[in-house]
């Protein structure tokens, strides 16, 4: 195991250790609460010159029920005199028996009063539940951060900070313990406070990005931890000194010192976050800092009120506890939203399903708990034991049936509430994939993909490189924003034999350029200079057929994990569109000439015949034959013949309209279907085609002679009387075939209409 792996393992063990520690501390807190509740009488006592003074009496507890009042002085327990809190504790512990009354003697207005008091109250379940919720919230946030802590120092700092808070929340209150236990708890708080101050200052200086002054002054970060250690030492020394001297004046100074430290802590943290939000370069970064600051504001206000407002001490303790619990719970909630709503850490996909199932499971448990504790007794009493039991069982079954719809509803709520950008991106990528399937040819598909992906993802540019099915030939398309030099450089790096291509073919997953540099340093740097940010392989049936190359975003934000997963799914849809278009073209167009196959052009003829009949519009059909093509093949070879077929097909295709259909009928024969074309228009189009082919010049393979090619054309035009599309198709095809045969018989390089018996024009070579 290398040092890096050992460090990762070390940090991965921390969450489990913290979980065990927090569980043990909370269990200790529950035990102490049960013990304290059995002895609780509901008074606040303090040593005074007159004796043990009752400073306050809590309402609804045994002391108030027995008649105790604020200002009473306790002088005896079970007729044994007590002079201070230590003697009171000793006598109380000796005489107290669960459920038995104690005789308490107090002095009030100069006379002694005997009170009959039964110590003990039920455990404070509200306090324990609030404590459990706080501990669970902070511990849960620590576990979330731990999933990402080995890649993001902010996650590591957050994990440590909230784990410390969870430990602090799990500790039992000091008033429940004896003198030594209380001192240990208070000292632990002081240590935790110093560490929390240091870690939180470091954390907020990195949200959303590293504070600029940290790069210029490297002593700042160590200074955070030095300050935290000094604060802990100062607080510990003050506590120990006050504990030994029991000086009331010094105790007041200690309270003021603690209040000042907490207030300064709150102000500095808030100021750093506000400054970070002000300096943020992106809206997302600003939202991250502002949301964390928003989560801290209740705590800042709480610290300010409790430190500066003298009336805070007069607030009811239960109300103060509820306020403190809400304030402490607000921070993890805000950070949770900062993580999942604004991508504070890239871990949203890891736990999204867990969040959904947790919510659904919690709701289900609540419903079942209500059924068992509330509904079942009521139904049993009202409807009878057997019927009530069956009814509750039926309701539980219905809850089980509704689990899936409830889960779907919660997923939808989470999707709409926490991830609207992701949902919008997914919808837009689906729309792009759908539009690609409607593109008529590969060039249009690639160009549309490049431009629309650039706009959707707000990129500087996008490039698409595909590999032809046979061989290593590549086809590419580029969006706006990419100059010719960068296009050439990119094609060199992404060649089919390049290390980048081979690496992507093995990984089969989108990869950032920063990560690619770990494996292919030189190629990664080359792509970085071009401005590339992400490479997405396009796979179809385990074969990589292309690469989608994305530049950086205009906003400067990085691609987060869910965007990578969406792009991965998107890439499979793109690849399927590529292959579907290729299959369509293979079935529709022939490879040599790029024209429609015989079956495809015949389907077009049948379709246009039907339309011509329905709309009573003219339709012209052309049969075209290359003159003396067999002798050319025999003399110069078939490769030269293939070149002639390609060039003739190319110039004819460039000479017709987009609505016309041109296909290879067989050998050196071509079939052209021209809708909405009458006899005169057909004649002009035939002349254009004949002249375009005649203008071609070919150099023979021996390089010594020029070869000129001509064509013979026969065409026919539909009449208005025909009402059967099938018959019309056969007639037009038969007449055009007869016309081209007549043109070849009368000297070739001719145009003949099916109704003519003489050539329709002079030879084109008489110039």
Image (cartoon, rainbow, N blue to C red):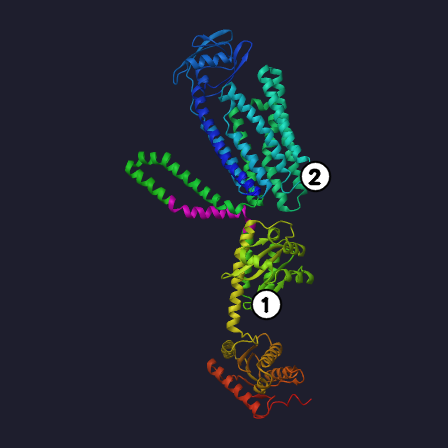
When asked about the image quadrant of residue 751, the answer is bottom right
Disc 1 is placed on an element classified as: loop
The reply to whether dot 1 and dot 2 touch (C-beta < 8 Å) is no
Q: Nearer the viewer, residue 425 or 385?
A: 425
Q: Is residue 292 left or right of residue 34?
A: right
Q: Is residue 121 left or right of residue 207?
A: left
Disc 2 is placed on an element classified as: helix
| Alpha carbon distance from label 1 to label 2 | 52 Å
Q: Nearer the viewer, mark 1 or mark 2?
A: 1
Q: Which residues are magenta?
A: 399-422
Q: Which residue is mark 1?
A: 473
| Image location (x, y in percent) of residue 214 | 68, 39
- Say whether residue 35 is magenta: no
| Image location (x, y in percent) of residue 482 | 67, 60
Crowding near the residue tagged with mark 2, few <14, some 14–19, many ≥20 C-alpha atoms within 10 Å: few
Let me know if residue 384 appears in the view.
no
Q: Which residue is mark 2?
A: 213
Q: Nearer the viewer, residue 53 or 158?
A: 158
Quarter of the image with the C terminus is bottom right
When asked about the image quadrant of residue 625, the answer is bottom right
In the picture shown, does residue 640 fall above or below 505?
A: below
- Say whether residue 416 is magenta: yes
When asked about the image quadrant of residue 314, the answer is top right
Residue at 40% over, 46% down: 402
In the picture shown, does residue 142 fall above or below 557?
A: above
Crowding near the residue tagged with mark 1, few <14, some 14–19, many ≥20 C-alpha atoms within 10 Å: few
| Image location (x, y in percent) of residue 210 | 65, 41
| Image location (x, y in percent) of residue 632 | 59, 85
């Amino acid at each position: 195991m290398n040092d890096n792996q050992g460090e990762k393992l070390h940090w991965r063990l921390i969450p489990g250790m913290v979980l065990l520690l927090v569980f043990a501390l909370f269990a200790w807190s529950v035990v102490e609460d049960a013990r304290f509740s059995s002895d609780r009488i509901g008074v606040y006592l303090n040593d005074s010159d007159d004796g043990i003074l009752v400073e306050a009496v809590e309402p609804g507890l045994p002391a108030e029920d027995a008649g105790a009042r604020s200002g009473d002085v306790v002088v005896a327990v079970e007729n044994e005199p007590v002079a201070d809190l230590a003697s009171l504790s000793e006598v109380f512990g000796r005489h107290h028996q669960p459920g038995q009354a104690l005789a308490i003697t107090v002095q009030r207005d100069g006379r002694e009063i005997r009170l009959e008091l039964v110590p003990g109250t039920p455990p404070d379940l509200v306090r324990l539940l609030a404590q459990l919720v706080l501990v669970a919230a902070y511990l849960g946030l620590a576990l979330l951060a731990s999933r990402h802590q080995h890649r993001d120092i902010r996650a590591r700092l957050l994990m440590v900070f909230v784990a410390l808070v969870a430990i602090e929340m799990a500790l039992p209150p000091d008033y429940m313990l004896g003198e030594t236990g209380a001192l240990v708890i208070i000292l632990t708080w002081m240590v935790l406070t110093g560490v929390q101050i240091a870690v939180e200052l470091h954390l907020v200086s990195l949200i959303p990005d590293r504070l600029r002054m940290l790069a210029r002054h490297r002593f700042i970060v160590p200074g955070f931890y030095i300050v935290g250690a000094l604060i802990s030492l100062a607080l510990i020394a003050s506590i120990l000194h006050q504990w030994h001297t029991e000086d009331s004046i010094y105790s007041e100074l200690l309270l003021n010192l603690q209040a000042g430290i907490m207030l300064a802590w709150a102000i500095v943290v808030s100021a750093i976050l506000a400054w970070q939000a002000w300096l943020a370069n992106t809206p997302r970064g600003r939202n991250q800092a502002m949301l964390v600051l928003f989560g801290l504001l209740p705590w800042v206000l709480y610290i300010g009120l409790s430190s500066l407002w003298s009336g805070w001490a007069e607030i009811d303790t239960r109300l103060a506890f509820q306020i403190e619990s809400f304030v402490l719970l607000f921070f993890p909630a805000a950070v949770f939203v900062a993580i999942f709503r604004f991508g504070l850490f890239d871990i949203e996909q890891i736990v999204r399903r867990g969040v959904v199932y947790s919510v659904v499971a919690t709701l289900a448990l609540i419903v079942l708990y209500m059924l068992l504790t509330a509904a079942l007794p009521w139904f049993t009493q009202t409807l009878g034991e057997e019927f009530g039991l069956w009814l509750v069982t039926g309701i539980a079954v219905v809850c089980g049936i509704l689990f899936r719809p409830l889960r779907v509803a919660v997923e939808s709520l989470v999707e709409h509430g926490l991830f609207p950008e992701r949902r919008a991106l997914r919808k837009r990528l689906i729309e792009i994939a759908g539009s690609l399937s409607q593109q008529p040819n590969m060039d249009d598909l690639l160009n549309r993909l490049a431009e629309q992906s650039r706009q959707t993802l707000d990129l500087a540019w996008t490039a698409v490189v595909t590999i032809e099915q046979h061989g290593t030939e590549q086809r590419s398309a580029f969006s706006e924003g990419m100059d010719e030099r960068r296009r050439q450089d990119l094609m060199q790096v992404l060649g089919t034999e390049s290390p980048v291509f081979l690496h992507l073919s093995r990984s089969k997953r989108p990869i950032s350029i920063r990560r690619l540099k770990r494996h292919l340093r030189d190629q990664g740097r080359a792509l970085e200079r071009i401005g590339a940010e992400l490479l997405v392989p396009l796979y179809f049936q385990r074969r990589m057929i292309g690469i989608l190359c994305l530049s950086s975003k205009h906003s400067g934000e990085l691609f987060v994990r869910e965007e990578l997963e969406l792009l991965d799914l998107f890439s499979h849809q793109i690849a399927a569109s590529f292959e579907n278009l290729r299959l369509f073209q293979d079935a529709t167009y022939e490879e040599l000439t790029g024209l429609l196959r015989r079956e495809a052009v015949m389907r077009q003829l049948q379709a246009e015949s039907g339309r011509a009949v329905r709309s009573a519009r003219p339709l012209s059909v052309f049969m075209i034959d290359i003159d003396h093509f067999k002798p050319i093949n025999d003399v110069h070879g078939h490769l030269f013949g293939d070149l002639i077929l390609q060039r003739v097909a190319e110039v004819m295709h460039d000479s017709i309209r987009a609505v016309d259909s041109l296909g290879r009928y067989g050998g050196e024969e071509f079939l052209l279907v021209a809708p909405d074309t009458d006899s005169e228009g057909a004649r002009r189009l035939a002349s254009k085609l004949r002249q375009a082919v005649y203008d071609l010049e070919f150099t023979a393979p021996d390089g010594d002679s020029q070869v000129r090619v001509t064509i013979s054309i026969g065409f026919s035009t539909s009449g208005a009387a025909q009402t059967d599309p099938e018959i019309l198709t056969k007639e037009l095809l038969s007449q055009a075939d007869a016309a081209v045969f007549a043109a070849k018989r009368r000297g070739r390089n001719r145009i003949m209409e099916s109704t003519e018996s003489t050539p329709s024009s002079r030879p084109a070579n008489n110039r």
